[in-house]
Image (spheres, rainbow, N blue to C red):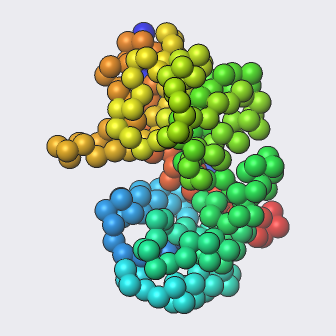
Amino acid sequence: MTVVMKGKPVADAISEKLIKEVEQLKSKSIEPKLTIIRIGAKGSDLAYERGALKRSKTIGISTQVVELPEDVTQENFLKEIKKANEDKSTNGILVFRPFPAHIDENAVKNAIDPAKDVDCMSPVNFEKVFEGDNSGFGPCTAEAVVQLLKYNKVPIKSTDITVVGASLVVGKPLSMMLLNEFATVSICHIFTKDTAAISCKSDVVISAAGKAKLIQTQHLKEGAIVVDVGINALPDGKICGDVDYDGVFDKVKAITPVPGGVGSITTSILASHVVKACKLQNNL
């Protein structure tokens, strides 16, 4: 019988632990704070922001939202980041991507304080992911996948895993995180000649390609475990993942739903990074 690996139990377990940690911090008159800097009001940004604010409130993390107009100059955008960097009450900074065309992403990446960069924009934190240095902050979505696998007791060490997608936000850092856990990782991308020939040999297949129903039965071996990171809008307005969920369901051992899977864990990971940053900044 196929197991549906939902994200809520994972998120709740992380949150329960964080609530206790935040209570301990507040007993020392320390209150963790997340500052969100957002350009414009895209629906996807607002949806994630609402989730992050709700999760933060549940855990006891203070929040601040800085909303900037779509036509904000790069100079003013960087000023807001600098302000958050210098604000001693702010422990974590979240900046939404992608940026408008007139904003230089590299300038933003290098402007954000690595010690407050709770979603791995800074090259410093990205490098730490590749080095296996846990003192930094990995991308929240990539880390959510690892935590989901661990929560569901899916073996990672010595496991053959295919990651479909090689973005800097999910695919590449996730592959490095799995390598750091001693998995044997294959990475497929848009120019891979035959993704199915690679993925069908893997024990675990993780898709983060951003293409609706890309992964079909031929991509999976019998009894594979499937993690779907994709969030895609269909013409009828419904949301689906990268995996043909109904088509592969009976073939796999376990699978994540979309929505309700990996995405629902990311705000808990974000919160955990804010608490971690707060502790490090207070030498705890």
Q: Quadrant of residue 256?
A: top left
**Is residue 63 in view?**
no
Q: Where is residue 65 in the image (x, y as percent from the top left)?
A: 46, 75
Residue at image point 59% right, 81% down: 81
Q: Which of 87 and 175 is in front in this view?
A: 175
Image quadrant containing the C terminus: bottom right
Residue at image point 76% right, 49% down: 130
Q: Where is residue 182 in the image (x, y as percent from the top left)?
A: 77, 30
Image quadrant containing the N terminus: top left
**Is residue 85 in view?**
yes
Q: Quadrant of residue 149?
A: top right
Residue at image point 38% right, 40% down: 211
Q: Where is residue 206 in the image (x, y as percent from the top left)?
A: 53, 32
Q: Nearer the viewer, residue 55 or 112?
A: 112
Q: Position of residue 38 (x, y in %)?
A: 44, 73
In the image, is residue 221 above or below residue 132? above
Decide if residue 176 is on the left or right side of residue 235.
right
Residue at image point 56% right, 72% down: 105
